[in-house]
Image (tube, grey):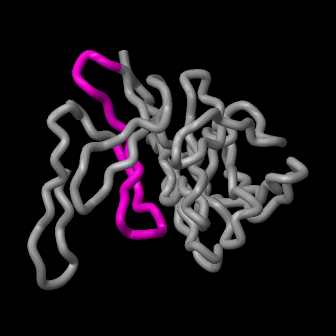
């Protein structure tokens, strides 16, 4: 894994000879560590914490646990993160390691997008649903409140909304979708 500077500076190579594959990750709010999903040779994927200033990646989940494909799986205070198990169900893990806790009110195939700015809610949407309904899920009560319905202006051929990204304050968003279009022709006079 390599960190490239966005201005003057040298690139930083993170040393992890034991990590065979990296998947995706995100910065922790302290800017000194990265949470990422990867795997060691001969082992299943899991989540790790990697210090930037040196030191090896430390596993914080058991094998089989991945980060959701979201911009920010880490809570604003940097203490918790959302992860997805082999059953496709999202849970919350402590950054420092420990047992996961279920997310109240989360239904199968609900995907966490990001934490709310105050850390008390998660924005979630159901994958493969058109239009995509994004909810704000209160973590203390499990209550879901519809935040937005997402669908392109021209819905023709839209088959899936599969990636939704929100700003930290939810003031802007963007999403990705699949569109399948085809043409139908009528031919007369064939023999």
Name the image quarter holding residue 138. bottom right
Q: Which residue is the extreme one toward the left?
A: 10
What is the x, y in percent for residue 55? 24, 50
Q: How many marks?
A: 0
In reply to whether residue 72 is colored magenta, the answer given is no
Identify the residue shown where x is 59% and y is 46%: 94
| Magenta part, dominant SS | strand
Identify the residue shown where x is 39% and y is 41%: 48
Q: Is residue 99 above or below residue 24?
A: above
What is the x, y in percent for residue 111? 63, 44
Q: Which residue is the extreme one toward the bottom?
A: 8
173 left or right, relative to 71: right
What is the x, y in percent for residue 152? 59, 62
Q: Which residues are magenta?
A: 24-43
In reply to whether residue 31 is colored magenta, the answer given is yes
Q: Is residue 140 above or below residue 153?
A: above
């Amino acid at each position: 894994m390599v960190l490239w500077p966005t201005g003057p500076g040298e690139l930083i190579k993170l040393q992890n000879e034991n990590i065979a594959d990296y998947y995706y990750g995100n910065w922790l709010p302290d800017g000194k560590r990265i949470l990422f999903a990867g795997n060691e040779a001969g082992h299943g994927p899991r989540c790790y914490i990697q210090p930037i200033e040196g030191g090896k990646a430390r596993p914080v989940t058991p094998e089989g646990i991945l980060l959701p494909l979201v911009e920010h799986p880490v809570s604003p205070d940097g203490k918790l993160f959302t992860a997805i198990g082999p059953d496709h169900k999202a849970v919350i893990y402590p950054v420092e390691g420990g047992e996961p806790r279920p997310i109240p009110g989360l239904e199968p195939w609900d995907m966490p997008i990001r934490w709310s700015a105050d850390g008390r809610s998660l924005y979630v949407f159901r994958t493969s649903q058109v239009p995509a309904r994004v909810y704000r899920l209160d973590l203390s009560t499990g209550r879901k409140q519809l935040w937005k319905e997402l669908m392109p202006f021209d819905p023709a051929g839209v088959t899936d909304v599969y990636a939704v990204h929100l700003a930290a304050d939810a003031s802007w968003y963007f999403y990705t979708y699949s569109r399948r279009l085809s043409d139908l022709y009528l031919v007369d006079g064939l023999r």
